[in-house]
């Protein structure tokens, strides 16, 4: 695993999802299937998905990519297009993503 403290050009992406009513279990199943595939992509230094204990319909993604090109590549993978765009996003009430740089 990459030492995140030594990254200078890395790109951090965070995402906050909220599942539509009745879709929480389906979204959780999709992200469990997606996570190991995303973690094994070239250019991914860290990739974690968390589900709120108090509001289980809410999910938090923390992703660290080698650079912006690695993030662009991530969004072009079959598993991203199929599982995230095709299956998960239609089950969401809200989806917010932000990008960050290391300081």
Image (spheres, helix red, strand yellow):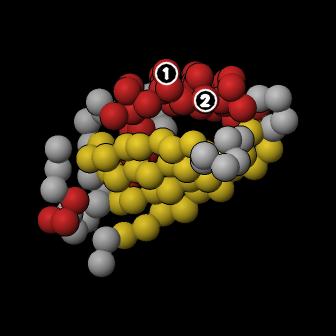
Q: Is residue 79 above or below residue 39?
A: above
In this rendering, position of residue 2 left or right of residue 17: left
User: Earlier along the polypeptide chain: callout 1 or callout 2?
Assistant: 2
**Image-based side of 81 in relation to 93, left or right:** left
Residues at discs 1 and 2 in contact (Cβ within 8 Å): no
Residue at 26%, 47% (x, y): give it. Answer: 45
81 vs 1, nearest the viewer: 1
Q: Residue furthest bottom?
A: 103
Q: Which residue is mark 2?
A: 28
Name the spot of residue 81 as percent of width and height, x first. 56, 28
Residue 81 in sight in this render: no
Vertical comparison of 24 with 13: above or below: above
Picture coordinates of residue 57 (x, y %)? 71, 41
Q: Which mark is on residue 6? A: none
Percent from the top left, x then y, of residue 61?
50, 48
Foreground tag (1 vs 2): 2
Q: Tell me which residue sits at (50%, 26%) in the image.
A: 32
Res 38 visible: yes
Q: Tell me the crowding category of disc 2: few under 14, some 14 to 19, or many 20 or more residues within 10 angstroms, Cα based.
A: many
Q: Image quadrant for the C terminus?
A: bottom left
Determine the secondary structure under disc 2.
helix
Mark 1, other Cα within 10 Å: few <14 / some 14–19 / many ≥20: few
Where 100 falls versus 36 (above or below)?
A: below
What is the secondary structure assignment of the residue under circle 1? helix
Disc 1 marks which residue? 33
- Residue drawn at point x = 29 percent, y = 60 percent: 10
Q: Quadrant of residue 27?
A: top right
């Amino acid at each position: 695993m990459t030492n995140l403290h030594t990254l200078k050009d890395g790109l951090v992406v965070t995402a906050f999802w909220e599942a539509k009513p009745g879709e929480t279990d389906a979204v959780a199943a999709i992200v469990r299937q997606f996570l190991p595939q995303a973690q094994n992509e070239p250019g991914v230094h860290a990739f974690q998905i968390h589900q709120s204990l108090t509001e289980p319909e809410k999910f938090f993604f923390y992703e660290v990519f080698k650079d912006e090109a690695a993030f662009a590549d991530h969004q072009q993978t079959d598993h991203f297009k199929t599982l995230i765009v095709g299956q998960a996003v239609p089950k969401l009430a809200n989806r917010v993503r932000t990008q960050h740089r290391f300081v």
